[in-house]
Amino acid sequence: AIRRIVKEEDGKIDTVYVSCGEAEPIQQFRNQLADIPVTVVDKFVLTKNDPESELKQQIDALTFDEKGVVEFPVMVEAKYFLGTARSTFSLLVAYTRTVDDPGDFLTEVIAEGSWVTPNNQRQWAETPSLKGDQFTKLIVLNGFDEISRYP
C-alpha cells in the first residue's frame, strides 16, 4: 500500500513515519522499503543522534502504551495513515481521523462485507486486504471483533 501511495503522489512523499513500540519491527519495515525513494523515520531514529538528550531519556522511560499516546497526534494529523484493524491503536487513529466525516467509517467502510461469528470473531472473505478511503486505510485480518466497540 505504501508503494502505491508513494507512486500515486509522484515524488511528493519522501518521508514515512512509523509508530511502533519496538525498534526491530520498524527496521524490518525500513528494509522492505529500501528500494523506493522514501526515508523511514520513527521516534528511535529521531532521538538517536543525541543519546544523552533529556527527550530521549523521557521517551525511553515511557511504557509501550505511553509511547503510543505520544505518537497518536502525529498519526491523526498525517496526510496518510495505514494501520491494521487488529490494533486498537490503529482503529482509534482511523476513528479519530474520520469521526466528523459523513457516515460511519469503521462500520460502513472497514467492516463492509464482513460478519461477526457467535464467538465474536470478525471475518472477511478475503484476508489480508486493504480497506479504507484515499487517506485512511486499514489492513483487515480475521480475528476478534474490535470494530463493534466503537460508537
Image (cartoon, grey):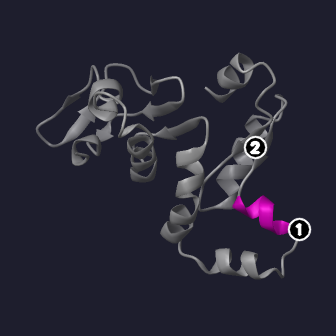
- Pointer 2 local density, CA inside 10 Å: few below 14, some 14–19, many at least 20: some
Which is nearer the eye, 116 or 72?
72
**Amino acid tagged 2:** Arg
Q: Which residue in the structure is indicated by mark 2?
A: 30
Residue at far right of view = 49
Judge from the rendering whether residue 73 lies leftward or rightward of residue 112; answer left or right. Answer: right
Q: Residue at x 14, y 43 (%)?
A: 119
Q: Which residues are magenta?
A: 43-48
Q: Considering only vertical position in the picture, is 88 above or below 131?
A: below
Which image quadrant for residue 58?
bottom right
Q: Residue at x 78, y 18 (%)?
A: 10
* Label 2 vs 1, first from the N-terminus: 2
Magenta span: predominant SS is helix
Q: Assess whether mark 1 and mark 2 are in contact (beta carbons under 8 angstroms).
A: no
- The percent coordinates of residue 35 (x first, y second) are 84, 29
Label 1 sits on a secondary structure element that is loop
- The percent coordinates of residue 144 (x first, y second) are 28, 44
Which image quadrant for residue 48?
bottom right
**Amino acid tagged 1:** Asn
Label 2 sits on a secondary structure element that is helix
- The percent coordinates of residue 66 (x first, y second) are 51, 70
- The percent coordinates of residue 25 (x first, y second) are 65, 52
Judge from the rendering whether residue 30 lies leftward or rightward of residue 140; answer left or right. Answer: right
Q: Which residue in the structure is indicated by mark 1?
A: 49
Which is nearer the eye, 135 or 127?
135
Judge from the rendering whether residue 151 lies leftward or rightward of residue 5; answer left or right. Answer: left
Q: Residue at x 67, y 76 (%)?
A: 60
Quarter of the C terminus within the rendering: top left
